[in-house]
Amino acid sequence: MSDCQFSKELLHAWLDDEAGDWATEVEAHVGQCPLCAQEVGEVRTAGNQLRSLVYDAVGDVDPLVALREIRERIAEKEGRSIWQAVLVGWQSLWETHQGAVLGVTLAFALGALASPLVLWLSSIEASDGISTWGDPRTASVTVESVEIEGGARTVVLQPQGSSTAVIWIDSGDVIDNGSSQ
């Protein structure tokens, strides 16, 4: 027996009811050609098996109903407020990382409880009676001598009763700041 030269594409189109004007010619050929009749039988058997597998896996689902349910779930998810999204995120975090969340919470709680104690201990006056809390640490410099060349002179400014002094060197040069006309 030789292979039939009839178009397999046209044969499969006829099985899908898409052969159009060729439908009667294909039907007549399948009625006389055992090879094409066998091909049609195999394709129908495979289609029935595929439908059975899909039905067993999914069940009787109307695609439009399933699509509507999917769209409703998407709309519900998009319609959530920020607070609901945070709540869902918190629940997800809690479900997956309970130990880590409890550890971080405990660390924050201990820090919140310990910080007032640390501040209180640091504010206790030192043994010499001078409070160290809030006292700025300032640098002190002792100037023993200043050598100035030319006509420059040393100027010291210390307000009465103050322990702070400002020292600068005045060269005597006049600086034009642009205010004179």
Image (spheres, rainbow, N blue to C red):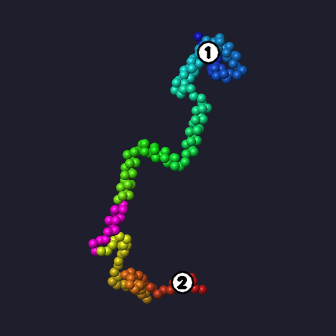
The earlier-in-sequence mark between 1 and 2 is: 1
Give the percent coordinates (x, y) of residue 105.
Answer: 39, 51
Q: Is there a contact, CB below 8 Å, between mark 1 and mark 2?
A: no
The residue lying furthest to the left in this view is: 127
Query: In the displayed structure, would residue 18 be above or below residue 78?
Result: above
Q: Amino acid at mark 2?
A: Asp
Choose between 153 and 50: the one closer to the eye. 50
Give the percent coordinates (x, y) of residue 101.
Answer: 40, 48
The residue lying furthest to the right in this view is: 21
Callout 1: few (<14), some (14-19), or many (20+) C-alpha neighbours within 10 Å? Answer: many
Task: Name the residue that disc number 1 marks.
Answer: 36
User: What is the magenta range?
Assistant: 115-128
Give the percent coordinates (x, y) of residue 21.
Answer: 72, 20
Task: Name the residue that disc number 2 marks.
Answer: 176
Image-quadrant location for residue 164: bottom left
Mark 2 secondary-structure assignment: loop
Q: Residue at x 33, y 83 (%)?
A: 144
Query: In the displayed structure, would residue 162 be above or below residue 6?
Result: below
Mark 1 secondary-structure assignment: helix
As for residue 67 lying within the magenta part, the answer is: no
